[in-house]
Amino acid sequence: MNTVYGRFNQFSGHIEFNAQAPEQSTVHVVIQAASINTQIAKRDKHLQTADFFDVSKYPELTFESQSIDKKSEGHVLNGLLTIKGQPILSLFLLRYHRHGEREKRFFTLKERPRSTATIWHRLRK
C-alpha cells in the first residue's frame, strides 16, 4: 500500500471548544466523499468508485467525537469515523497553539498511526 496525500474540498462541521476543560469539547464533521482531491484526476475518479469510497452509494463520510483525552503530546480526539456506512473507531492527535497577544487559537490535527491502514483493511474485506 502506498501513501497518498490529498484532501477533501467540501466539508462542514461543528466544533464546540471548551478552553477550561478541553476534554468536554465536541466535534462533528460531514465530508462530501466526491470532493476527494489528490491532484491526480484519474486517481480521484478511482477513489470515488466502489473500490474505495463508493460515492454513488455513500456520498458522505462523517466523524462524531466520543471523547478527548489529555496526553503528554497533546490531546487525543477519539470518535467514530463512518465510511461506506461502517463506523470505525478513530484516533486523532490534537495540538493546541497560541499565537501572539490576540490569543489566536488553532489546532493541528494528525491521524494517529495505524488508523488509515486499519480503516482500508476493514473496508476492502
Image (spheres, grey):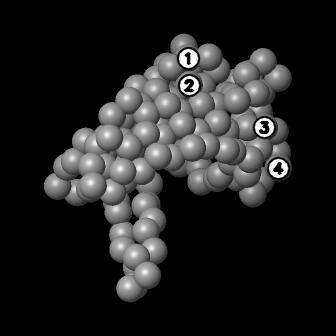
**Labels 4 and 3: the sequence-earlier one:** 3
Residue tagged 2:
82
Label 4, residues with CA under 10 Å away: few <14, some 14-19, many ≥20:
few
Q: Which residue is mark 3?
A: 34
Query: Are dots 2 and 1 in contact, CB under 8 Å?
Result: yes
111 up-or-down from 39: above or below: above
| Mark 3 and mark 2: Cα distance apart in space | 15 Å
Amino acid at pointer 2 = Thr
Height in image: 5 above or below 62? Answer: below
Q: Nearer the viewer, mark 4 or mark 2?
A: 2
Q: Tell me how far mark 3 sits from mark 1, CA to CA.
A: 17 Å
Binning the other alpha carbons within 10 Å of mark 3 as few (below 14), some (14 to 19) or many (20 upward) gives many
Q: Amino acid at mark 4?
A: Ala
Q: Earlier in the sequence, mark 3 or mark 2?
A: 3
52 on left or right of 124: right
Mark 1 residue element? strand
Q: For residue 31, which quarter of the picture?
A: top right
Quickly name the residue at label 1: 86
Residue 102: percent from left, percent from top: 43, 81
Contact check, label 4 and label 1, Cβ < 8 Å: no
